[in-house]
């Protein structure tokens, strides 16, 4: 995991095509590389899925960036497809009734167009 600048301005993040090089960015979080199954990856891509529920084994926080790498499972394990999405964690909730205490619910927003 590496740290990344964050932008709430005209663009979404430093790697976003809407951000310009002369904008200033405030450090807000870390980058988490994650596997994501194809149906969920497509829903995030289409912006019909705007949340992630994950085990909080990485100390997720609002302001973090999730890099969702599409992962296809098969009989011998699985493989990455090469499809990748970057999303911002906009908000995060812990201790929600009905959700295991080790898990968090994160509101996400796609980076870029």
Image (cartoon, rainbow, N blue to C red):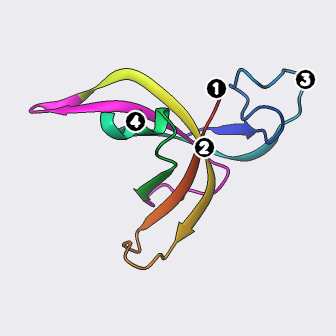
Say which mark, if any, is on residue 22. Answer: 3
- Dot 4 and dot 1 residues touching (CB under 8 Å): no
Identify which residue is drawn at 58% across, 62% down.
92
Q: Which residues are magenta?
A: 55-78
Residue 80: x percent and y percent?
32, 25
Q: Quadrant of the N terminus?
A: top right
| Pointer 2 residue | 109
At label 1, counting other C-alpha atoms closer than 10 Å, the crowd grade (few under 14, some 14-19, many 20 or more) is: few
Q: Earlier in the sequence, mark 3 or mark 2?
A: 3
Residue projecting furthest to the bottom: 97
Residue 59 in magenta? yes
Disc 3 + disc 1, Cβ < 8 Å: no
Mark 2 and mark 4 in contact (Cβ < 8 Å)?
A: no
Q: Secondary structure at mark 4?
A: helix
Q: Residue 106, percent across and down? A: 53, 57
Does residue 43 appear in the picture of this structure? Answer: yes
Q: Earlier in the sequence, mark 3 or mark 1?
A: 3
Q: Which residue is mark 1?
A: 113
**Residue at 43% across / 79% down in the picture?**
97
Numbered circle sitting on residue 41: 4
Residues at marks 3 and 4, CA–CA distance in whole angstroms = 32 Å
Could you tell me if residue 37 is visible in this image?
no
Left or right, 17 with reference to 1? right
């Amino acid at each position: 995991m590496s740290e990344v600048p964050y932008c709430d301005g005209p663009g979404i993040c430093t790697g976003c095509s809407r951000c310009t090089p002369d904008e200033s960015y405030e450090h807000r979080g870390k980058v988490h590389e994650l596997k994501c199954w194809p149906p969920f990856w497509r829903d995030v891509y289409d912006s019909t899925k705007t949340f992630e529920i994950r085990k909080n084994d990485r100390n997720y926080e609002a302001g973090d960036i999730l890099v969702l790498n599409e992962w296809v499972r098969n009989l011998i394990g699985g493989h990455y497809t090469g499809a990748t999405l970057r999303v911002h964690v906009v908000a995060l909730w812990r201790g929600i009734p009905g959700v295991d205490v080790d898990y968090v619910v994160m509101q996400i927003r796609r980076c870029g167009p």
